[in-house]
Image (cartoon, coloured by chain):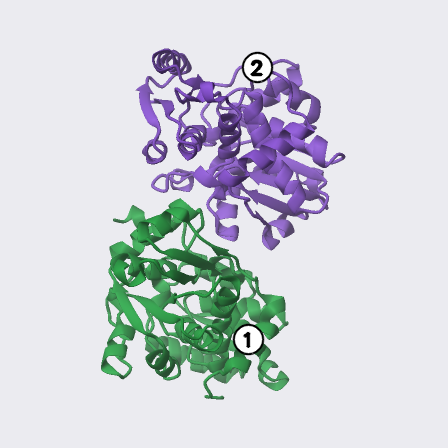
Chain colours: A green, B purple
Amino acid sequence: MDFKIPDRNDIIAAALRIEPYIHHTPVLSSKLINEILDAEVFFKCENFQRAGAFKMRGATNAILTLSKDELKDGVATHSSGNHAAALALAARNIGVKAYIVMPSNSSNVKVDAVRHYGGIITFCEPNVIAREEMLAKVVAETMATEIHPYNNVRIIAGQATAAKELIEQTEKLDIIMAPVGGGGLLSGTALSTVYFSPGTIVIAGEPMNADDAWRSFQEGSIQPVSPLHTIADGLRTSLGTLTFPIIRDHVKEIITVDENSIIEAMRLIWMRMKIIVEPSSTVPLAAMMKQKSTFKGKKVGIILSGGNVDLDHLPWNKI
Amino acid sequence: MDFKIPDRNDIIAAALRIEPYIHHTPVLSSKLINEILDAEVFFKCENFQRAGAFKMRGATNAILTLSKDELKDGVATHSSGNHAAALALAARNIGVKAYIVMPSNSSNVKVDAVRHYGGIITFCEPNVIAREEMLAKVVAETMATEIHPYNNVRIIAGQATAAKELIEQTEKLDIIMAPVGGGGLLSGTALSTVYFSPGTIVIAGEPMNADDAWRSFQEGSIQPVSPLHTIADGLRTSLGTLTFPIIRDHVKEIITVDENSIIEAMRLIWMRMKIIVEPSSTVPLAAMMKQKSTFKGKKVGIILSGGNVDLDHLPWNKI
């Protein structure tokens, strides 16, 4: 395992490497949302990405940079969400097996997605220790190579390609925003911004109910994730040893938002833009709504991280 | 009022005329949907159109072709749906008043949209006679110019621009599909296909529960709309005296589909394409699913007519 922070060339190489396997997603905007915020917002639509989320970028880059020897027994991870489906699809694309440990309470939609892409699922108790133990067992039995969902430089370089594309698709942005969970997307976004759009500020949005990144940022050391529930199911993880220092050094601010504002922002995007985004995606827009003065008159790029929602259980039916 | 069927130049002129006021909507496709159907399907995304539906094209063209004298007292229509919002917005864009007669049971979402665009609403009893009587009263009082939602050549020429764009955005299509309600979109689509892509076949999709177009097509004369309920709320109207002959002469086939297949097609588009489309939009895809052999191996363009749905009442929550 290699711990060097991805440099400019690593991200350029990742973009070229993954190109045949990913969508070059569009950048959309909404006149009404611009009016509400008195800003120009450019949404990078990773909800249209293959497997429905930016995770496909990192998973593909990680797999394509492994040696034949590392790939021969397949890859493995534990994930209840988008990384699981992305790794399964990325592995299938090059004919490699993917072993996915999923908590027994994973939603049917996510389980079906992993199965659809040919992932080999092992269920475990729904807690971090059980997940890690089960993954260790699967890896020991299969000799598969573990690919961590975010604390992996190859994953970070892959996720960084979303912001790189956004920068290429827009005129000079004042601010780029991403949500933060484990920090793979945010650290990659920060690196691409430093390399390809110096002077542009990076601001993250985070659910108040999973504000470990905000607390880590304030404390200067990694803080554990809060036990509270957030609807933004992609953002429940805590920062990693690789993602934290990048975020600490290159992110200007983390804005935390409450659950209702995440749902409101989600509904606004669905209603006005006619696109399906998952709650994690809408956290940066909720942050803009909360702290309008920071963004007033600015050109702001937002990475809409994914679009995998359970259509039978939409959040506004629960308010 | 002018009853000449729009010719090639009328549609080219309409496209140029409305250009500043409408979105040039994208054409999307889905690998999975192509696999399911063993065909190449190109979706023209009028759900991303301003006011959320293709109706903006016809309404804008109709308004822009009226004389100053015809515009001075505003425009008027009765509609519970997308034409209402589109006419209100098209009128506002050029600073003209729009009087909209809406049935008292119109959904809040539709009423809010009309209000948001500055439309002046008069409510009436929810039946055709009450709507027409109230509209006559409003027109008598205001001297506004009535703009019919589909039985109007300017509307038809405007709606035709969606298929014209789709043809320009794709390689030669074998088949172009649209849903049919009053026939404004379908007749415009048929004309654009004849003029700009001769040899391409036009096939319509229609809900079985509102199969007046299918019956009219078989009988050779306009048949009344069925009293059955369909979830495809944009398709509950019957053909007009202007739209019927165009459809009779230039549409190859009308395929009727049941309610469940409309909902299934809608869910498939939402899940796989991550875009929000209303039930009326998904009728052509349901028709493809029903009659796969007709489309096998073909390049098929589908006009996704709109994206205005009530997020609090999604159809799959009712099955």
Left or right: residue A46 versus residue A318 is right
Between A293 and B195, the residue placed more toward the observer is: A293
Report, in whole angstroms, how far the alpha carbon at label 2 lies from the one at label 1: 59 Å
Q: Which mark is residue B246?
A: none
Give coordinates of residue A106: x percent, y percent.
39, 63
Q: Is residue B80 above or below residue A26?
A: above
Q: Residues within 10 Å of mark 1 (few under 14, many from 20)?
A: many
**Amino acid at the residue labelled 2:** Gln
Left or right: residue B78 versus residue B33 is left
Q: Do the residues under discs 2 and 1 have CB atoms within 8 angstroms? A: no
Residue B39 shows in the view: yes
Give coordinates of residue A19: x percent, y percent.
60, 69
Q: Are marks 2 and 1 on the same chain?
A: no
Look at the image and tell me in which quarter the C terminus of chain B lies.
Answer: top left
Residue A99 shows in the view: no
At a point 59% along the width and 32% down the height, the residue shown is B14
Q: Which residue lies under the disc numbered 1?
A: A61
Q: Is residue B30 above or below residue B165?
A: below
Q: Is residue A196 above or below residue A305?
A: below
Give coordinates of residue A294: x percent, y percent.
28, 63
Give coordinates of residue A14: x percent, y percent.
56, 76
Q: Which residue lies under the disc numbered 2?
A: B223
Judged from this view, the residue extending furthest toward the front is B68
